[in-house]
Amino acid sequence: MLLVGRVFEFEAAHHLPNYKGPCQENHGHSYRLLIEVDGESDEYPGMVCDFGTLKDIVEEKILCVLDHSDINELMWDDSKKAIDPPIAENIVKWIVDELKNNLQLVRVRLWETSKCYAEWRRDKV
């Protein structure tokens, strides 16, 4: 199987309600996002996915929403009751849900810091 991937970066803030520790306070991260896909593109013979197309889809569906945002605002309903805490694992689930109809996802990895990440892989689902 051939895979291609692209790394993206964005800045965002969040806090963890009802969490006992420093992350309960509003703070920001310089997130790093890896998207890997497989398949075959109709754009050019043998091409898995055009890197420009991958970039455009991720920018439209993910970065335009998350970059310089307060992620808590994205994960609250109108009654201000938490739907999902804005932890890396739930952000990855949201990213997968946003991209799965547009890309043949193999892996989504989100680094919250340079040493800590959450990951979704198709073979583990």
Image (spheres, grey):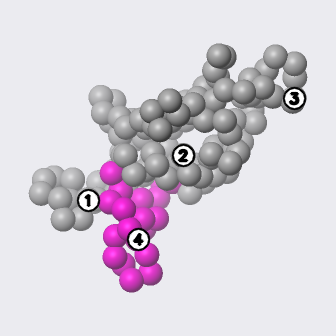
Q: Are marks 4 and 3 in contact (CB under 8 Å)?
A: no
* SS for dot 1: loop
Q: Position of residue 86 (x, y in %)?
A: 35, 56
Q: Are marks 2 and 1 in contact (CB under 8 Å)?
A: no
Quadrant where the image shows the N terminus: top right
- In space, the residues marked 1 and 4 are separated at their CA atoms by 12 Å
The answer to which of 112 and 69 lies nearer the viewer is 112
Q: Is residue 15 above or below residue 50?
A: below
Q: How far is disc 1 from disc 3 in space, using C-alphas?
A: 43 Å
Q: Which is nearer the N-term, disc 3 or disc 2?
A: 3
Magenta portion: prevailing SS class: loop
Q: CA distance from mark 4 to mark 3?
A: 39 Å
Q: Quadrant of residue 46?
A: top right
Tell me if 54 is positioned left or right of 111 in this view: right
Question: Residue 76: which disc?
Answer: 4
**Residue identifier under label 2:** 96
- 124 vs 48: above or below: below
Identified by mark 4, the residue type is Trp
Rendered residue at 56%/57% (across/down): 65
Q: How far is the residue under mark 3 from the one under mark 2?
A: 23 Å
Amino acid beneath label 2:
Val
Q: Is residue 84 above or below residue 61?
A: below
- The residue segment tinted magenta is 66-87
Q: Earlier in the sequence, mark 1 or mark 3?
A: 1
State the mark number for residue 16: 1
Q: Indicate which disc, 4 or 3, sits on the residue closer to the N terminus.
A: 3
On the rendered structure, is 125 left or right of 106? left
Q: Residues within 10 Å of mark 3 (few under 14, many from 20)?
A: few
SS under mark 2: helix
User: What residue is disc 3 on?
Assistant: 43
